[in-house]
Image: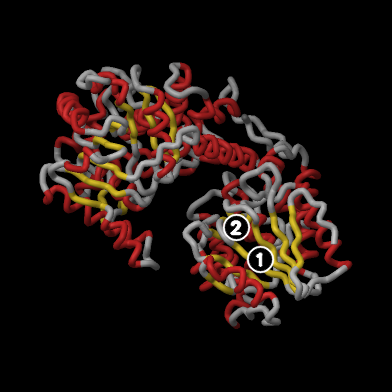
């Protein structure tokens, strides 16, 4: 049998079993490029000449099984015909795999995403390795596209349409154990027996798992009801004009049994939409953020956090969740206790299927009112109240006690690093590591360089942020850095509209219709009216104006938003109680969003971030700014000088670089 393949390696065992190892050349991760798929097709042709007793497809890379299609190839498509050709290629090859006469098995260890899972679904069996790194998903919707290589057909047929649509419409992943419970995996095994399990299963002759009767009904006579419910759930989260892909997934499954080639109208909508172009752009922006810190081999094991308030406590909890030993300091154990209680809830939620891991994480979070952990920590993060003199005194003491090469970091959101660093004998040691609330949900962390910050310390800080699975954004010390500097004018514009008599519900509805994840007035309530008032000039964009009248009134009466149960809204069980919104005045969203756009442009011009792409990444991942726009700077480019969003050529879906 020929083995002259660049990306695949064939091994035949004595009993006629064939192992096919995927090892993408010149790459650390397996992706299904056109060349790799073409070779896979040749492999199937070769196997037709000498059919094996069974075929096991596995990865030769430690990084995982298959990360999906080659996104760069997708991003370079320049016509609808090219998009159709890409879909046809994978559809036909995976149909060919599904139709071979011999048993096939995908041995999945590590990530199995997108086209990788579609390949696995085309096999008769799937064995998944029970490790934390094993994740299975069809995340195409997050790129504004659909699982066009058979995923929309085979996943509902494998696990039932309700669970399949949930995975495809959200892009969320499942671990090995959940894959087994869903029926996505036939076996879930530890690494030590994975090869033996794969051999045994592929040669077993076991019939495919049959769908339960109710799932068969949902794939048949009840299809319309399932689709209607799924469409309503999607509509509650995403507008079809902004995010057409989830609607196309539902329609393609309902009308064409998941056959993307037959769904020409739906595919034309997808590939004719600027959303796909911009979401692919966001994907590359995220990859760029993930690259920061890779040039530094710093790996923090011990973290010391000072300040057990909501922010400091949640930073400490997140670090413990990610496997670090964390000491949490405040004035007393009583002040630390609420943070430990919140952490326990976080760990229980994250490890709901593994109580031992939740206990281990809690054991790694150590109350430390005396601050003993500072002398052993690799990273020290200050998260106390925003008082310059208090921070100076704290860092002067920390410098004397910290290890010489430990990272000293402030989580300040409003004070200049240069002003804090004057208390240090070596000001170059101080950097900013600025998290956002809620820490567990927001992926971005600003890594702040002061005028005298040491470049190595900054790289260490970025490596630390990546080590806790967050996205580091390098910014320079300036009022509000990037994220708060653009949010302040945006929230101010919304609160000025409240003062003009426009209902908070109407304002929030206008901005949610624009594509923001939460309205600006609800955002102020969530952040806290006390924090909004304390932000002062950051909120007013640097102007010496008086704060918005209604904000000052509510703050003065002790109504601080969500934390007190009432602000611009009443809050019950963590939810804002909103009355029916009024008619949205024309141009309201544009009026409120304009200060955010201009603040972003100003931050780029003043060098707070290195370029417009990083500004877009920061504002999207730090504020949730409508991802389908590609970010505020990209939105400004799309809008043009006349303020109108031009019609975009539907055939062009390459990202802006």
Disc on res. 585 = none
x and y percentages locating residue 63 in the rendered image: 57, 51
x and y percentages locating residue 610 in the rendered image: 49, 22
Farthest front residue in view:
14
Q: Quadrant of residue 646?
A: top right
x and y percentages locating residue 90 in the rendered image: 75, 55
Q: Quadrant of the N terminus?
A: bottom right
Determine whether 106 is above or below 467 in the image.
Answer: below
Q: Is residue 344 left or right of residue 32?
A: left
Q: Quadrant of residue 211?
A: bottom right
Q: Are the residues flagged by discs 1 and 2 in contact, CB closer than 8 Å?
A: yes
Secondary structure state at the residue bearing disc 1: strand
Q: Residue at x 69, y 55 (%)?
A: 22
Q: Is residue 275 left or right of residue 321?
A: right
**Residue 582 visible in the picture:** no
Disc with the residue nearer the chain's start (1 vs 2): 1
Chosen colour scheme: secondary structure
x and y percentages locating residue 427 in the rendered image: 28, 20
Residue in the foreground of this view, choosing between 369 and 470: 369
Q: Which residue is under mark 1?
A: 106
Q: Residue at x 17, y 47 (%)?
A: 368
Q: Which residue is under mark 2?
A: 112
Q: Residue at x 32, y 42 (%)?
A: 437
Q: Residue at x 60, y 57 (%)?
A: 112
Secondary structure state at the residue bearing disc 2: strand
3D distance between C-alphas at marks 1 and 2? 10 Å
Say which of marks 1 and 2 sits in front: 1
């Amino acid at each position: 049998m020929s083995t002259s393949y660049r990306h695949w390696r064939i091994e035949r065992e004595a009993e006629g079993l064939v192992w096919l190892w995927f090892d993408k050349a010149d790459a650390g991760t397996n992706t299904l490029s056109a060349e790799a798929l073409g070779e896979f097709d040749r492999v199937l042709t070769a196997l037709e000449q000498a059919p094996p007793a069974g075929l096991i497809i596995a990865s030769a890379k430690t990084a995982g099984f298959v990360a999906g299609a080659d996104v760069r190839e997708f991003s370079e498509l320049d016509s609808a015909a090219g998009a159709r050709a890409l879909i046809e290629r994978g559809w036909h090859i995976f149909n060919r795999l599904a139709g071979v006469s011999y048993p096939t098995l995908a041995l999945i260890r590590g990530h199995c995403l997108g086209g990788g899972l579609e390949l696995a679904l085309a096999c008769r069996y799937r064995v998944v390795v029970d490790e934390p790194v094993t994740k299975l998903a069809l995340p195409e919707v997050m790129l504004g596209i659909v699982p066009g290589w058979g995923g929309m057909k085979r996943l509902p047929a494998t696990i039932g349409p309700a669970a399949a649509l949930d995975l495809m419409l959200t892009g969320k992943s499942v671990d090995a154990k959940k894959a087994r419970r869903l029926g996505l995996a036939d076996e879930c095994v530890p690494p030590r027996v994975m090869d033996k399990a794969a051999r045994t299963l592929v040669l077993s002759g076991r019939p495919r798992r049959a769908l339960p009767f109710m799932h068969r009904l949902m794939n048949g006579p009840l299809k319309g009801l399932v689709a209607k419910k799924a469409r309503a759930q999607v509509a509650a989260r995403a507008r079809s004009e902004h995010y057409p892909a989830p609607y196309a997934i539902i329609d393609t499954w309902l009308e064409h049994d998941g056959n993307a080639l037959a769904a020409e109208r739906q595919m034309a909508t997808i590939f004719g939409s600027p959303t796909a172009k911009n979401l692919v752009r966001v994907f590359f922006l995220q990859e760029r953020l993930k690259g920061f810190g890779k040039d530094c081999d710093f790996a923090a094991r011990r973290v010391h956090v000072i300040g057990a308030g909501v922010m400091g406590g949640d930073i400490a909890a997140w670090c413990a969740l990610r496997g670090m030993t964390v000491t949490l300091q405040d004035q007393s154990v009583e002040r630390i206790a609420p943070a430990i209680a919140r952490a326990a809830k976080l760990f229980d939620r994250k490890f709901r299927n593994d109580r031992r891991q939740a206990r281990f994480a809690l054991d790694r979070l150590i109350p430390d009112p005396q601050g003993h952990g500072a002398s052993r920590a690799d990273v020290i993060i200050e998260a106390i109240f925003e008082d310059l003199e208090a921070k100076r005194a704290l860092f002067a003491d920390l410098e004397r006690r910290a290890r010489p090469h430990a990272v000293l970091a402030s989580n300040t959101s409003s004070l200049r690093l240069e002003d804090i660093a004057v208390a240090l004998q070596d000001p170059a040691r101080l950097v900013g590591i600025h998290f956002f609330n809620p820490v567990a949900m927001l992926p971005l962390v600003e890594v702040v360089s002061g005028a005298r910050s040491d470049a190595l310390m900054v790289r260490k800080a970025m490596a630390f942020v990546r080590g806790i699975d967050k996205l580091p954004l390098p910014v320079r010390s300036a009022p509000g850095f990037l994220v708060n500097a653009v949010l302040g004018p945006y929230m101010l514009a919304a609160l000025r509209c409240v003062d003009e008599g426009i209902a908070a519900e109407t304002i929030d509805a206008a901005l949610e219709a624009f594509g923001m994840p939460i309205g600006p007035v609800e955002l102020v309530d969530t952040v806290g009216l006390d924090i909004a008032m304390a932000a002062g000039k950051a909120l007013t964009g640097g102007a010496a104006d008086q704060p918005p009248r209604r904000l000052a009134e509510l703050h003065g009466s002790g109504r601080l938003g969500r934390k007190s149960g009432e602000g611009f809204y009443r809050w019950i069980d963590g939810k804002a109680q909103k009355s029916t919104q009024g008619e949205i005045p024309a141009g309201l969203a544009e009026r409120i969003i304009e200060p955010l756009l201009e603040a972003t442009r100003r931050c780029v011009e003043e060098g707070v971030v290195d370029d417009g792409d990083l500004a877009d990444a920061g504002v999207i991942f730090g504020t949730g700014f409508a991802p389908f726009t590609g970010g505020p700077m990209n939105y400004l480019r799309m809008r043009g000088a006349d303020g109108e969003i031009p019609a975009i050529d539907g055939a062009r879906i390459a990202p802006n670089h």
